[in-house]
């Protein structure tokens, strides 16, 4: 098994639809011991209903990336209970609905700060917390989306947050490379999750994607989970600072 004797910290599990959950299942299937980071009580309740599906019971750790104490205490628990880490998964994003719905030009200062803080700066926060625990060769994976480089209707401030996240991936990769720690992005096609519900007309986005993508379909969440497994595992040991697209061939298409 690819992740035998390996351990990982997967953040961003909200429920059974989460990309983080698909990633956790893929890592667990390949033998990894896992810590799952959750935001609050509501997420914990959902996670407790599904953890029985994993082969090994995960450690559940509260970790709010906007709260330094919460993050410090999460890494203290992960270090004590799990020990060193072979991978870290960042699958966290948030923006206020009004900042996705309206004009990008009208994004409020607080909405902009919130979206970039939770969705992009949080990668620095998690990497700093995990750095001392990560083994040489360890993989950090952050979930991103094409809205970072194209103006996608109704993605707005989240597109700017994803651009910051992807740039952050490159800077972090350049700094952590000397320790053998790799940092990569995984750009997923649209998947129906809780976060996606914040995007108005998400169904239209799915429809257009399936029409235009080279594979003429949408992605399944397990395809994203398996790709995240690759970026976490030694199979991708020669890669860092990259953004890998798993989007059914949407980005490569012209008109
Ligand atoms: P999701 O709602 O299941 O996951 C988002 C997670 O972010 C939730 O678990 C939520 O609790 C967490 N979160 C929000 N604020 C937080 C905070 N302050 N501290 C800690 N956690 C916090 O949705 P998802 O679609 O699985 O999103 C996971 C990642 O995948 C996000 O980065 C998202 O932008 C990215 N992504 C999603 C899609 C898609 O179409 N669903 C496509 C490409 C990339």
Image: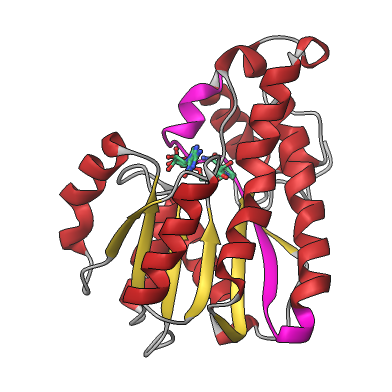
Residue 222: percent from the left, percent from the top? Answer: 42, 58
Residue occupying image coordinates x 75% and y 15%: 107
Front residue of 193 and 52: 52
Indicate the quadrant containing the N terminus: top left, top right, bottom left or bottom right: bottom left
**Residue 7 sits above or below residue 54 on the image:** below
Residue 38: percent from the left, percent from the top? Answer: 37, 48
Q: Quadrant of residue 207?
A: top right
The answer to if 23 sits in the magenta stretch is no
Left or right of 37? Residue 142 is right
Residue 90: percent from the left, percent from the top? Answer: 55, 55
Front residue of 207 and 247: 247
Q: Quadrant of residue 151?
A: top right
Q: Which residues are magenta?
A: 177-200
The answer to if 191 sits in the magenta stretch is yes
Residue 230: percent from the left, percent from the top? Answer: 55, 75
Residue occupying image coordinates x 65% and y 31%: 115
Color theme of the render:
secondary structure
Q: Quadrant of residue 168?
A: bottom right
**Residue 61 sits above or below residue 194 on the image:** below
Residue lying at the far front of the rendered structure: 69
The answer to whether residue 213 is seen in the rendering is: no
**Residue 184 sits above or below residue 107 on the image:** below
The answer to whether residue 84 is seen in the rendering is: yes
Left or right of 59? Residue 202 is right
**Residue 52 sits above or below residue 6 on the image:** above
């Amino acid at each position: 098994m690819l992740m035998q004797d390996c351990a990982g910290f997967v953040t961003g599990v909200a429920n059974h639809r989460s990309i983080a959950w698909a990633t956790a299942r893929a890592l667990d299937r390949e033998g990894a011991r896992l810590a799952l980071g959750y935001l609050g009580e509501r997420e914990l309740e959902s996670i407790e209903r599904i953890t029985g599906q994993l082969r090994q019971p995960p450690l559940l750790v509260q970790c709010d990336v906007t709260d330094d104490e919460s993050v410090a205490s999460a890494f203290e628990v992960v270090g004590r209970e799990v020990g060193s880490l072979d991978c870290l998964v960042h699958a966290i994003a948030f923006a206020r609905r009004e900042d996705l719905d309206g004009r990008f030009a009208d994004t409020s200062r607080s909405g902009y700060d919130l979206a970039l803080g939770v969705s992009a700066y949080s990668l620095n926060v998690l990497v700093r917390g995990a750095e001392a625990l990560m083994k040489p060769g360890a993989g950090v994976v952050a979930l991103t989306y094409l809205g970072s480089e194209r103006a996608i209707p109704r993605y707005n401030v989240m597109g700017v947050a994803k651009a910051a996240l992807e740039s952050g991936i490159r800077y972090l990769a350049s700094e952590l490379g000397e320790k053998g720690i790799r940092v990569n992005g995984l750009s997923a096609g649209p998947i129906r999750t809780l976060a996606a519900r914040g995007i108005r007309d998400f169904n239209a986005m799915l429809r257009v994607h399936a029409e235009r993508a080279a594979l003429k379909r949408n992605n399944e969440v397990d395809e994203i989970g398996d790709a995240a497994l690759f970026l976490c595992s030694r199979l991708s040991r020669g890669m860092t600072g990259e953004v890998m697209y798993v989007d059914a061939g949407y980005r490569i298409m012209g008109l």
